[in-house]
C-alpha cells in the first residue's frame, strides 16, 4: 500500500469564524511528549487547566473542565446533563447555533419552546420574561455570541429573570470566551460551554464547560441516567475531581495546547485581552465603513471578535473569498443559513486580533473589491483603521 | 493573574494500555499550521485519512471516518446510531469494555441481554449462537481486544452467526486496529470503532469508525432521530461525504496526527506491522515466563499488543508501577475492575512494539522484582527474549 503524500498544510491567516489563528506557542505545546492520562504530571496539567478556565469563566465552580470534543460536544454535554425527557426548555434562536441547541435539546427529550428574533438581532429581557412566564421552563438556553450573525447578546438581565422563575440558565460562550467578559459567577450563569478554536487561539478539539452548584444539584437529582455515557458529568466529575477515577482516555496533547492557550491569556490579563479585541474590532469596522461595508448585526450589539458584514451589491462573494484564500492566504467565513451568499464573517479572535491582521485583510479586500468594480478612494480602509489605532 | 507554570511534560516510555508511545513524526504533525475545517487542503486531508482508514480496516465502506472524540466516543457513536429505543441488543461482557458498551446501549434505550464470561476468557461461537437464537437481537456487540484483560476474541465465526440471524455485528477494535488483522469486509463486520491512542501511535482524541451499507440502511431507515446530534452519522455523512456540508468544527491538528500515523503504518505495510507486534509479544512473553510471570488471558487467545499478566505473589504491585514510572520513566497499566491490584497491563502498541522497549521493561521489572525478594536467575528474562529475537 502506498503511503499518504507528505503532510504539508499551507500557511493561512485564519480570519474566519474559527478555527482562528493559532498561537505558535500553542502549536509547539501540542507536540510535547505524550504522558499517560493518569500520570501524576497529567493530573497536574488537568488541575492547572481547570484553574485557568475558572479564571477565564470568572467562576469558582468546582465542575469547570474541558469536554473531550469540540464546542458542539460542549453544547451537547451541557444540554443532556441538565435535561430529562419531558423537561420544558426555552431556547433563543436568532442564528444557526440557537437552532442547533434546539435540535440537541429535542433529541434529549426536551419540550422546547423557541423564542425567535431575526438574524443579527438580540433578545430583550422583556421577551425572555414573557416566554419564561408562559412556559415555566426548567432550563433557558441562550447564545451569547452568535457566530453566524455576529450578534452580541447581553446576559446579565436575562440571568436574573431566569433565576427569579426558578429556572437554570445555559449559555453558549463558544465564540465569546476570552474575547469579551464572561462573568459566570457575577451574572449567575448555571451552565456554560465554549470551544478552544475561537478566542483561545488553540486548535479545535476541546470544549471548556462549567456547571455551578445549582446545576450540579439538578444533575445529581436526576431520575434518569444522562443519555450520553461519554458526556455524563456525574462520571466525569470523578475523573476531573479529586478522585481521578478513570473514565475515558483524555486527549493529552490537545490538553497541552489548551494549557498553553490559557496561560497566554492569563499572562496578558483578561482586561487587556478584551481591550485588544475591542480596539482591533473598532479599527476593522472603521476600515470597512470607509469602503462602504456594513455590519449584519444590530448596532450596539456587535461582537468584536466576529464581524459579520453584508457583501456589497454586485460583488461575487465566493470569488472574493477564494481570491483571499488563494492569492493572499487569508481565510474569512461565508454566511450560513439565512445569511448564505449575503454575508462575510471576519474573525479577529485571540492571537488573530492584532493590527497586522486588520491591515492585511483590509488591504486585500480593498484590492479585490476594486478589481470587481467597487468604487472608493484607494487606501481608504487602511487610512480609517490607522486613525483608530492612532486614537 | 499569574500565568501557568511552563509546560514541561516528563519523557515517558508508554508501555501501558494506552496512550501508547507516540511516533515522533506524529507529534511533529500535530504542530503543523492549522487550516480551516472547510479549507481545500483540509478536505484533502480528510479524503486521505478516510482512504488510509479503509486500508487499515480492510474495507471499501464509504462511511469510514474519524469521530471527533476518543475511543469511547466511537463506541457511543456506533451504538446510538444503530439503536432505537426498545431495540434488542446482545453484548458480550468479559471485561470493562463490554460492560461499558452495555451501559452506553442501555442509555440509548436498548434492551440489552448480556452474555458473560470470566475475565480473561473469550466467547465461543456456540454461546453466541444460543444467545442470538433466544433473543433475536437487532445488534450484537462484541469486544475484539479486551483492553482490561488482554483477551483476543475471534470475530469471523461470530459474524456469520449474527448475520444468519439477520442481526448487525458491532465490534470494538479500539486496541486491535493496527496491531492484528481487522477484516471488516471479509468478516462482514457491520459497524466498528477504534481509537487513535493504541496501535496507531497517535495521541488520544479521535475515534476511527466504519459502517457498511447494511448498517447505513438501518440508520437511514430509523423511525427516531439519533439521540446524539454530535455523533449523528446521517449528518456526519454530509461533512465526510462529497457534499462537505459544515457540521461541527473538526479537530484539525488531531487529524494531522492521525494522517501521519496512518501513513506510517501504510509505509510499513499491514502484514509487516502485524508480524512486528507478534514477534515483540512473543519475546516479552518468553521473558516474563523466565521470571515466573503468567498471562491473565486464556492461552491461545492472548493479544500481542496488550499483555495482561498476574502480579507475582507477595509483590507490592503499586510500588512496582510507581518505581517503573519514577525510576525508569516507564508507564505500565494497573488492573481494572475485577483485576484491580492483581494484574499489570503491559502494552506493546504501534511504535512502542519494538525490541528496545521489550528489553527495557524486562530489565527494569527484573530489577524491581529482585528488590522485592523474588527469586530467579539474574538476566533470565532478557536472555529468554533475546532467544526469541534470534529465532
Image: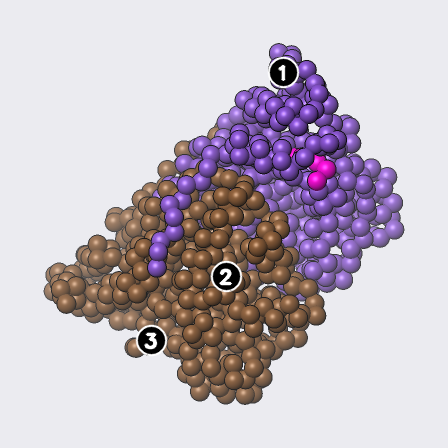
Chain colours: A brown, B purple
Confirm whether the magenta stretch covers residue B343. Answer: yes
The quadrant of the rendering that contains the C terminus of chain B is: top right
**Same-chain status of marks 2 and 3:** yes
The quadrant of the rendering that contains the N terminus of chain B is: bottom left
Q: Which mark is residue A301?
A: 3
* Residue pointed to by mark 2: A64
**CB contact under 8 Å: marks 3 and 1:** no
Residue A81 visible (yes or no): yes
Confirm whether the magenta stretch covers residue A174. Answer: no
How crowded pointer 2 is (Cα within 10 Å; few <14, some 14-19, many 20+) is rated as many
* Residue pointed to by mark 1: B379
Residue A226: percent from the left, percent from the top? Answer: 65, 63
Front one among A324 and B340: B340
Q: Nearer the viewer, mark 3 or mark 1?
A: 1
Give the main secondary structure, helix, strand or loop, of the magenta stretch: strand
> Disc 1 and disc 2: Cα gap in Å?
49 Å
Q: Which mark is residue B61?
A: none
Q: Residue at x 70, y 67 (%)?
A: A224
Residue B195: percent from the left, percent from the top? Answer: 58, 42
How crowded pointer 1 is (Cα within 10 Å; few <14, some 14-19, many 20+) is rated as some
Q: Chain of mark 1?
A: B
User: Which residue range is magenta in the image?
Assistant: B341-345
> Disc 2 and disc 3: Cα gap in Å?
28 Å
Residue B362: percent from the left, percent from the top? Answer: 61, 23
Q: Identify whether B132 is placed above or below B354.
A: below
Residue A331 visible (yes or no): no
Q: Residue at x 73, y 23 (%)?
A: B292
Q: Identify whether B61 is placed above or below B223.
A: above
SS of the residue under disc 2: strand
Q: Nearer the viewer, mark 2 or mark 3?
A: 2
Amino acid at each position: 500500500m502506498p503511503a499518504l503524500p507528505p503532510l504539508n498544510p499551507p500557511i493561512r491567516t485564519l480570519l474566519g469564524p474559527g478555527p482562528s489563528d493559532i498561537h505558535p506557542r500553542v502549536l509547539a505545546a501540542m507536540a510535547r511528549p505524550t504522558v499517560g492520562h493518569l500520570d501524576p504530571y497529567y493530573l497536574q496539567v488537568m488541575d492547572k487547566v481547570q484553574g485557568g478556565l475558572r479564571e477565564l469563566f470568572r467562576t469558582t465552580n468546582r465542575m469547570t473542565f474541558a469536554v473531550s470534543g469540540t464546542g458542539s460536544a460542549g453544547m451537547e454535554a451541557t444540554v443532556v446533563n441538565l435535561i430529562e425527557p419531558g423537561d420544558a426548555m426555552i431556547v433563543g434562536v436568532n442564528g444557526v447555533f440557537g437552532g442547533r441547541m434546539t435540535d440537541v435539546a429535542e433529541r434529549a427529550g426536551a419540550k422546547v419552546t423557541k423564542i425567535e428574533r431575526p438574524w443579527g438581532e438580540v433578545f430583550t429581557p422583556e421577551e425572555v420574561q414573557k416566554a419564561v412566564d408562559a412556559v415555566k421552563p426548567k432550563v433557558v438556553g441562550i447564545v451569547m455570541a452568535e457566530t453566524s450573525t455576529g450578534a452580541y447578546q447581553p446576559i446579565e438581565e436575562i440571568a436574573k429573570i431566569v433565576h427569579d422563575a426558578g429556572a437554570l440558565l445555559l449559555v453558549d460562550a463558544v465564540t465569546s470566551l476570552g474575547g469579551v467578559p464572561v462573568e459566570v459567577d457575577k451574572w449567575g450563569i448555571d451552565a456554560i460551554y465554549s470551544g478552544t478554536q475561537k478566542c483561545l487561539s488553540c486548535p479545535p478539539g476541546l470544549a471548556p464547560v462549567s456547571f455551578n452548584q445549582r446545576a450540579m444539584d439538578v444533575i445529581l437529582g436526576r431520575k434518569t441516567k444522562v443519555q450520553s455515557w461519554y458526556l455524563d458529568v456525574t462520571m466525569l466529575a470523578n475523573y476531573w475531581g479529586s478522585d481521578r477515577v478513570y473514565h475515558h482516555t483524555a486527549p493529552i496533547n490537545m490538553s497541552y495546547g489548551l494549557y498553553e492557550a490559557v496561560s497566554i491569556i492569563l499572562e496578558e490579563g483578561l482586561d487587556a485581552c478584551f481591550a485588544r479585541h475591542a480596539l482591533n474590532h473598532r479599527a476593522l469596522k472603521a476600515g470597512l465603513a470607509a469602503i462602504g461595508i456594513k455590519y449584519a448585526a444590530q448596532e450596539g450589539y456587535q461582537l468584536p471578535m466576529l464581524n459579520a458584514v453584508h457583501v456589497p451589491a454586485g460583488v461575487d462573494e465566493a470569488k472574493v473569498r477564494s481570491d483571499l484564500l488563494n492569492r493572499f492566504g487569508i481565510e474569512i467565513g461565508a454566511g450560513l443559513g439565512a445569511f448564505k451568499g449575503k454575508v462575510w464573517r471576519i474573525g479577529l479572535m485571540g492571537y488573530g486580533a492584532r493590527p497586522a491582521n486588520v491591515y492585511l485583510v483590509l488591504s486585500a479586500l480593498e484590492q479585490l473589491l476594486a478589481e470587481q468594480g467597487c468604487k472608493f478612494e484607494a487606501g481608504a480602509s487602511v487610512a480609517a483603521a490607522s486613525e483608530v489605532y492612532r486614537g
